[in-house]
Image: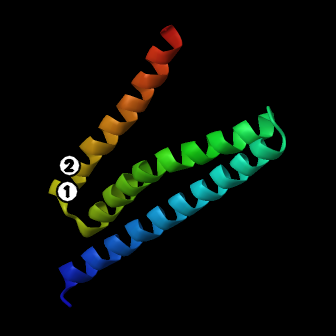
Amino acid sequence: MNGHAAQDAKLEQIIRTILKIGVGTSSAFLAVGLVWSLTSAGSATAATLMTVGLLILMATPISRVAASVFEYTIQRDWLFVLLTTIVLLEIVASVIAALVFHRKL
């Protein structure tokens, strides 16, 4: 395996780990929140647990892109640093826009 292939394999492993942890953690919060809501109707704790689970699930792809920017920077692959930074900025901008415009409605 040459140097570039090894770097690609490392990036794939990092992304795989981020996705596993993100989805697993999110699923755990959602499952506990769902069980909690079924056992005690109207529980604020259950709603909080499910909200945290959804936030973790939404943050997982953002973390994946951020890790890609970091890893491409280490690899000095400037084209992919630029492209993934643009994607990351677009995601962050859309989150900010959603928060700002949601409050005005």
Q: Residues within 10 Å of mark 1 (few under 14, many from 20)?
A: some
Image check: 77 left or right of 32? left
Which of the two residues, 56 or 69, is positioned nearer the viewer here?
56
Name the residue located 69 percent from the left edge and 47 percent from the top edge.
34
Q: Are marks 2 and 1 in contact (CB under 8 Å)?
A: yes
Q: Residue 105 at x, y = what percent?
A: 49, 8
Q: Residue 96 at x, y = what percent?
A: 43, 27
Q: Residue 80 at x, y = what percent?
A: 20, 56
Quarter location, residue 15: bottom left
Q: Residue 55 at x, y = what percent?
A: 56, 43
Image check: 80 left or right of 37? left
Quarter location, residue 2: bottom left
Q: Amino acid at mark 2?
A: Leu
Q: Is residue 18 above or below residue 99?
A: below
The N terminus lies in quadrant:
bottom left
Which of the two residues, 68 or 57, is positioned nearer the viewer here?
57
Name the residue located 32 percent from the left edge and 56 percent from the top edge.
69
Residue behind mark 1:
80
Name the residue located 70 percent from the left edge and 44 percent from the top edge.
49
Q: Which secondary structure, mark 1?
A: helix
- Alpha carbon of mark 2 to alpha carbon of mark 1: how far? 5 Å
Q: Which secondary structure, mark 2?
A: helix
Q: Residues within 10 Å of mark 2 (few under 14, many from 20)?
A: few
Q: Which mark is residue 83?
A: 2
